Image (tube, helix red, strand yellow):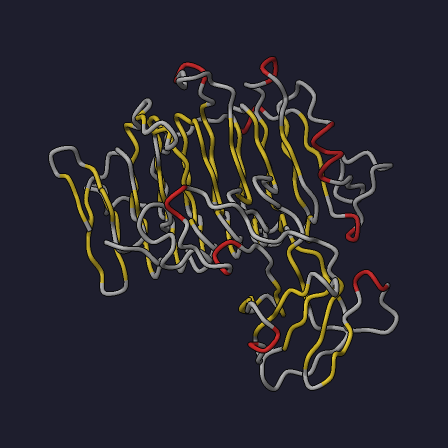
């Protein structure tokens, strides 16, 4: 781990933090990782936060639910008993300050929030009715049942093996940088399979199959897998495979939006290769003009887990707060972005990230959290981040060098 005390800058931390130039008050080594803390360590979690959003000014409340949980675009969306889909709710925001309450369930689709510059300052709040029960998911569900439609039916392959239909010919992702020529096939794949929420290990040939592993057979149009030892599949076994997030597509994509809240949501199973489960981007010019950066963004009590690449990508932001959120078991980076001004990460946890990148992305890219303020292609630094703090955050078990 390298720390520049004169510039208050972490260069690299084995616990999983990689930074360009951000203000870090204090790093404390723990037995199982690193805590980044500040002199305000003793403050309670009710301290004032940087993101300033007047949630009491909301004049419209909408309710959303997945299709399978009652979401119906023929409904009004104005009561809990008449929810619309999340896609429909996004279209109903209009010019009013709006709260969208997400009812329990798995939201299995792509979502985009782009209100244009005329409505960039409209307050929009996405809030789970029950914390952790509204899930933005990149996977679809499959079932081991003869009555299940063929497109989502699990079949027995004999000798303890099973298969699910697979019509996605993703192959290998492109190398991210020219010096990545030593990457393995495993590093550059993006398929993921889950049984009862637990991710199986991807292997590269059928001969490597064993309990808790899966193999993609693109010629036979199927994924072959073996459940954990001792498990008997039934129609109630929850089997999921990631199908959304290809290349740089984020599951939930936000364009140029200020005055924004995400609260109590889960973002998981994005099959992105170089993308994120929740991504922020803004048209801010070249080089980026901080005057155009969105401001007052709050991410509160959210979970980013089991995404193939990155959980959260927060790019071009000022006056932001990420608090009480967990970034866990993402394939490369838990969270990050760059070009940050006056922001904070409070009481967040970055746990066991970079399982997909492993030693390949241990040095120059992956971490529990990473910020980059430059153009890698031109080796140019642009608008170095400032006024950003990590307070009472924990980095544990992230693969990296330091």
In the shown orientation, is residue 65 left or right of residue 122?
right
Image point (48%, 42%), residue name = 312
**Where in the figure is residue 311, as x and y percent of width and height?**
49, 47
Instruction: Classify the position of the C terminus by image quarter.
Output: bottom left
Image point (34%, 54%), residue name = 362
**Where in the figure is residue 372, as x and y percent of width and height?**
35, 35
The one nearer the camera, 370 or 167, is 167
Count the labels in the image: 0
In the shown orientation, is residue 139 left or right of residue 382?
right
The one nearer the camera, 202 or 305, is 202
**Where in the figure is residue 315, as x and y percent of width and height?**
44, 31
Q: Is residue 341 above or below residue 216?
A: above
Q: Quadrant of residue 211?
A: bottom right
Q: Is residue 143 above or below residue 386?
A: below
Image point (26%, 33%), residue name = 21
Q: Is residue 57 above or below residue 89?
A: above
Image point (28%, 35%), residue name = 20
In the shown orientation, is residue 72 left or right of residue 238?
right
**Where in the figure is residue 166, as x and y percent of width and height?**
73, 60
The one nearer the camera, 179 or 344, is 179
């Amino acid at each position: 781990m390298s720390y520049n005390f004169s510039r208050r800058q972490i260069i690299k931390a084995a616990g999983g933090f990689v930074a360009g130039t951000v203000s870090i008050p204090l790093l404390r080594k723990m037995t199982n990782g690193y805590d980044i803390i500040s002199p305000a360590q003793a403050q309670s979690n009710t301290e004032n936060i940087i993101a300033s959003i007047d949630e009491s000014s909301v004049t419209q409340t909408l309710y959303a639910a997945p299709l399978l949980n009652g979401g119906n675009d023929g409904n009004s969306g104005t009561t809990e008993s008449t929810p619309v889909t999340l896609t429909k709710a996004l279209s109903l925001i209009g010019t009013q300050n709006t709260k969208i309450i997400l009812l329990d369930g798995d939201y299995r689709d792509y979502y985009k929030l782009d209100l244009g510059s005329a409505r960039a300052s409209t307050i929009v709040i996405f809030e789970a009715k029950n914390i952790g029960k509204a899930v933005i998911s990149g996977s679809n569900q499959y079932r081991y049942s003869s009555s299940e439609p063929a497109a989502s039916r699990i079949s027995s392959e004999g000798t303890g093996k099973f298969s699910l239909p697979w019509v996605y010919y993703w192959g290998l992702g492109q190398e991210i940088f020219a010096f990545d020529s030593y990457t393995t096939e495993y590093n550059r794949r993006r398929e993921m399979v889950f049984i009862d929420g637990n991710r199986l290990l991807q292997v590269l040939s059928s001969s490597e199959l064993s309990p808790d592993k899966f193999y993609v057979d693109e010629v036979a149009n199927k994924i072959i897998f073996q459940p954990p030892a001792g498990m008997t599949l039934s129609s109630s076994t929850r089997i999921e495979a990631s199908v959304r997030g290809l290349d740089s597509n984020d599951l939930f994509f936000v364009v140029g939006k200020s005055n924004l809240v995400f609260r109590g949501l889960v973002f998981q199973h994005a099959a992105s290769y170089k993308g994120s489960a929740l991504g922020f981007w803004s048209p801010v010019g070249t080089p980026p003009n901080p005057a155009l950066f969105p401001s007052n963004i709050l991410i509160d009590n959210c979970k980013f887990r089991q995404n193939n690449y990155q959980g959260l990508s927060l790019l071009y932001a000022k006056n932001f707060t990420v608090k009480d959120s967990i970034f866990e078991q993402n394939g490369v980076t838990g969270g990050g972005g760059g070009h940050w001004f006056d922001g904070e990460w409070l009481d967040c946890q970055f746990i066991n990230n970079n399982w997909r990148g492993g030693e390949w992305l241990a040095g120059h890219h992956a971490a529990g959290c990473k910020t980059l303020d430059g153009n890698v292609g031109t080796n140019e630094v642009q608008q170095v981040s400032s006024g950003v703090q990590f307070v009472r955050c924990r980095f544990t078990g992230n693969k990296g060098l330091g």
